[in-house]
Amino acid sequence: MENKKALVLLNMGAARSKDELATFLRNMFNDKNILSIPNDLIRSMVASLIVMLRLDKAWENYEQIGGASPLHQLTNQLISKLQPLVEDRYYVVEAMRYTSPFAQTAIAKIDQQNIKDIVLLPLYPQYSTTTTKSSVEDFIEHCKEFDFNIEIIDPFYKNDLLNQSIYEEILKTKNNDDDFHLIFSAHGLPQKVINKGDPYQKQIEEHTKILTNILHKNNINFKSINLAYQSKVGPMKWLEPSLEDMLKNFSNQKVIIYPISFLIDNSETVFELQIEYKEIAHNLGIKEYRVCSCPNLSDTFIQTIIDLI
């Protein structure tokens, strides 16, 4: 159809094998938005060293979730549900930052369809240089020889339908129990990234307030509502409080975790939150520990995407 646009869902990518995990790690630490070493050669050498040091341990984690992140399968299912609903206006594809299908693959598919107008939807509700900026820049970089018109969807953590989809997931996990503490868990970042002007922390805090207000407005009761940051690596200062430190407050209590910075489940939700932090919670004497799913394939989340475009 004439004037049909391409909708490109941007995300990090994820591993489906040990080789692909090596690719993921190498590409991630080669990204100047992640490892801010100005010299490409030195950054590449550091990335290779990190892969060598981390790969085996990281793969052991993946083996605990069946040897693959659910991100790709869920993204494919999301596209299958979304495409028929926007068929007359959009051709939907995915582009991952660190594993295939890369931007080049998405661009080749769009070019084959003779489509000139592209809408980029970064599947990160809050903006960060390490996620949104990195994914958008990478896609645009690969478009240089094509005559595309590119539109980028702004951060959408304030979107009513998105927050309705999150509210629904929290409700499903809470299941009418009022004796839980709720922790919004965001992916952590080194403090120095925020100090350089990255708006991520501010937007995460705003998003937490929006969701807290929605819960209060609907008389959904928690003993407390909190924000913490997961995934810290290395010795440098990261955003605080860490999820581990936050969990220390709730010995002999019940806790629900909502992964506020993710829209599709991945290794950081199904391994880190559901396995690694669950064990930490158990060791801290937490009575019950539940993790909400991301919106994933929910009808409300699919309507969110349609609303955004």
Image: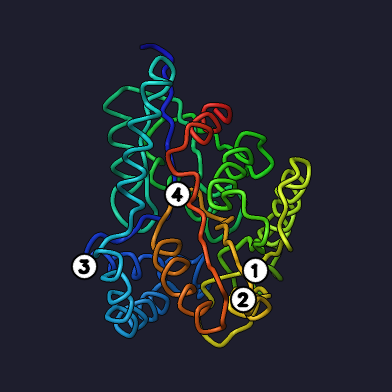
Closer to the camera in the image, 76 or 105: 76
> For the residue marked with disc 4, what is the amino acid?
Ile
Q: Nearer the viewer, mark 4 or mark 3?
A: 4
User: In which quadrant of the rendered image does the C terminus lie?
Assistant: top right
> For the residue marked with disc 3, what is the amino acid?
Asp
Question: Residue 42: image x %, image y %?
Answer: 41, 79
Mark 3 surroundings within 10 Å by alpha-carbon count, few (fewer than 14), some (14 through 19), many (20 or more): few
- CA gap, disc 3 to disc 2? 34 Å
> For the residue marked with disc 2, what is the amino acid?
Leu
Mark 4 surroundings within 10 Å by alpha-carbon count, few (fewer than 14), some (14 through 19), many (20 or more): many
Direction top: furthest residue: 2
Secondary structure category for the residue under label 4 = loop
Closer to the camera in the image, 280 or 21: 280
Mark 2 surroundings within 10 Å by alpha-carbon count, few (fewer than 14), some (14 through 19), many (20 or more): many
Q: What label sits on residue 228 in the rendered view?
A: 1
Question: Residue 154: image x %, image y %?
Answer: 62, 40
Q: What residue does disc 3 label?
A: 19
Q: Residue at x 61, y 34 (%)?
A: 161
- CA gap, disc 4 to disc 1? 19 Å
Q: Nearer the viewer, mark 1 or mark 3?
A: 1
Q: Residue at x 36, y 43 (%)?
A: 75
Q: Which is nearer the N-term, disc 1 or disc 3?
A: 3
Secondary structure category for the residue under label 3 = helix
- CA gap, disc 2 to disc 1? 9 Å
> For the residue marked with disc 1, what is the amino acid?
Ala
User: In which quadrant of the rendered image does the N terminus lie?
Assistant: top left
Q: What residue does disc 4 label?
A: 264
Q: Residue at x 56, y 88 (%)?
A: 235
Q: What residue does disc 2 label?
A: 247
